[in-house]
Image (spheres, grey):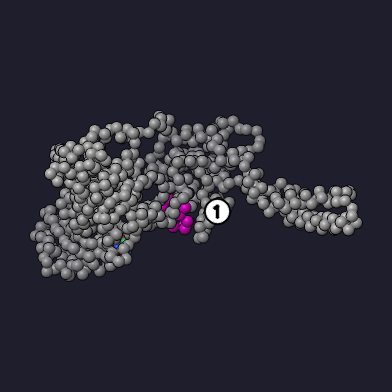
Amino acid sequence: MDVRRRPPKPSGPPTNSLDHHHQQNKGSSSASARVLDRSPSPTPKASDALPLPLYLTNGIFFTLFFSVAYYLLHRWRDKIRNSTPLHVLTLSDLAAILSLIASFIYLLGFFGIDFVQSFIARPSNDHWDVDVEDERFILDEDRRPRRLPSVVSATPISPSPAPKLMEGPPPTTTTPLGISHPPCPKEEEADEELVNSVVSGDFPSYSLESTLGDCLRAASIRREAVQRITGRSLSGMPLDGFDYDSILGQCCEMPVGYVQIPVGIAGPLLLNGCEYSVPMATTEGCLVASTNRGCKAIYASGGATGILLRDGMTRAPVVRFPTAKRATDLKFFLEDPLNFDTLALVFNKSSRFARLQGIQCSIAGKNLYIRFSCSTGDAMGMNMVSKCVQNVLDFLRSDFSDMDVIGISGNFCSDKKPAAVNWIEGRGKSVVCEATISEEVVNKVLKTTVPALVELNMLKNLTGSAVAGALGGFNAHAANIVSAVFIATGQDPAQNIESSHCITMMEAVNNGKDLHISVTMPSIEVGTVGGGTQLASQSACLNLLGVKGASKESPGSNARLLATIVAGAVLAGELSLMSAIAAGQLVKSHMKYNRSSRDVTKIAS
Ligand code: ADP
């Protein structure tokens, strides 16, 4: 739950809501004052209740406690010696006992100050209450028309600056030891100035991290500026609880928070004799449950087998020559086996892991598209292969000085676009995965029959996709599983396009009793190092699968295993969804898992 921290309510007479709105819309000086409100009001201490300085009252009560205790012990000893009853008290005895109790209470409060403070602070938890009036104001503000970004960056957005929309607990700065503390007033003033500068366009938002050297603070300032510029609240998107240092220069620029995606587990997936719990990050109801059911069917039938067919990332620059003849000269040079070793030497020199596997050329007039393919260890490999390709282009310039490099990527690679070249030649890891599901399991776990599944696969995944003119889409929903596992394990979700290319085959075997199912996926692009894989949550998911980071023993084996697991999970997903469709359960189960009983009209804004 996101609760906006509020300053304590003023003790004076309440202002009416119009006044309140007016105050919220005042000039920048008042806005500045409000940003300073981000810090919690000074926390009340027990000692604040005392009229004297703390050191003085401490001294008085310490002295009082020990002197009266000493006096009373002496009086007690005298009474025992004189056989005077202990309960007979003089006036001075009474005064001493009262002083002892008073000083004891003070000392108890002093040492247990946090404890006492919790009692003092409790009644004032309205600091955290969301004022209904403020809430309505923020909602009203959210309805303001969006301004064009170009206008926003060029000029201040309006004569009266947008109100502060900051919500949630105040941003904290974190010491190198990881201890967070609220910002000091000076820092807050500086932050407010920076927010204003970003809003007015005087300070580039992208420079916040490098200027401040504090990524959380930079994100907090940018977030506030974005809210003021757009007049829209980011309430609901968390800011705290994320390591912004870990994404700097690697995963995401200009962060203002993070989106939470739940992770479910499907499994155990029994694949090549090992069990895997497959993490899936998704907001689609039914998906994890369905994949889980597929895993159960595979498990009950003795498991699946996954085989890696090839492993090679590709990059294809486009170069142009004055004539088509010159373009073909280079094509023949590059494809000549006699030149391969020299080219591989040049290609491989910038990485310990990149190893050139082959070069495939395609001509379009005087333009040449050169598709380099190489192994990339445990990295998905796009950065790695791009660097290596650059080496070769630099090398070729000496013999082909008329070569004009148009682009390091000429789309014959082909990255993040549906392309037949990936479907036919493969890109990244090519995997085939199969399982034989017994008739009993098809009937009892999948609630359908083998002939129904075989027929549906033929008419839907093969014929239906052919009718649709599909490219690599001969499956029921491979992209669902691929995307969910990709997001959970820090892969590039855009590569889901080619990574989801899959042909699902189903056949009745063992005299037509059992079902043989296979998925063939020619371009699964995954890595276990680099990119988003090193982030905490994603790396935890990789760890769950036992493929976190670089493999020390056999570089590349972690990424290859991950690709095989992805194919295994797709096999499970295909099996379950196809069964649901064959049994006519699809709509029923989606109504159950995708539509909860919550009244969505209440959620809608
Ligand atoms: P990508 O090419 O997938 O974007 P990067 O090239 O950015 O990934 O990241 C891979 C980095 O990890 C390289 O610097 C590489 O030297 C290093 N590395 C360490 N161990 C391995 C390994 N086993 N496989 C691949 N790369 C590794």
Total number of numbered discs in the rendering = 1
Q: Quadrant of residue 244?
A: bottom left
Residue 358 lies in what quarter of the image? bottom left
Asked if the residue at label 1 sits under 8 Å from ligand 1, the reply is no
Which residue is found at the position 21% from the left and 69% from the top? Answer: 345
Q: Within the magenta stretch, is there residue 212?
A: yes
Residue 321 on image: x %, y % = 14, 59
Compared to residue 176, the image places residue 131 above or below, namely: above
Q: Nearer the viewer, residue 258 or 160?
A: 258
> Residue 476 appears at what percent x and percent y?
22, 41
Secondary structure beneath dot 1 equals: strand
Residue that mark 1 sits on: 181
**Badge 1 amino acid:** His
Give the percent coordinates (x, y) of residue 12: 66, 36
Q: Residues within 10 Å of mark 1 (few under 14, many from 20)?
A: few
Which image quadrant for residue 574?
A: top left
The C terminus - image quarter: top left
Q: Is residue 77 left or right of residue 24?
A: right
Q: Quadrant of ligand 1?
A: bottom left
- Measuring 38% from the left and 43% from the top, which residue is drawn there? 149
Q: Residue at x 18, y 63 (%)?
A: 357
State the residue in front, 435 or 519. 435
Q: Residue at x 58, y 32 (%)?
A: 19
- Against 481, residue 64 (above or below) is below
Q: Which region of the structure is painted magenta?
A: 205-216
Q: In the visual, does 26 lie left or right of 599? A: right
* Spot occupied by residue 545 in the image (x, y as percentages of width and height): 33, 55
Q: Give the prevailing secondary structure in the magenta stretch.
A: helix
Q: Is residue 234 visible?
A: yes
| Residue furthest out toward the right | 82
Q: As rendered, which of 421 and 106 lies closer to the eye?
A: 106
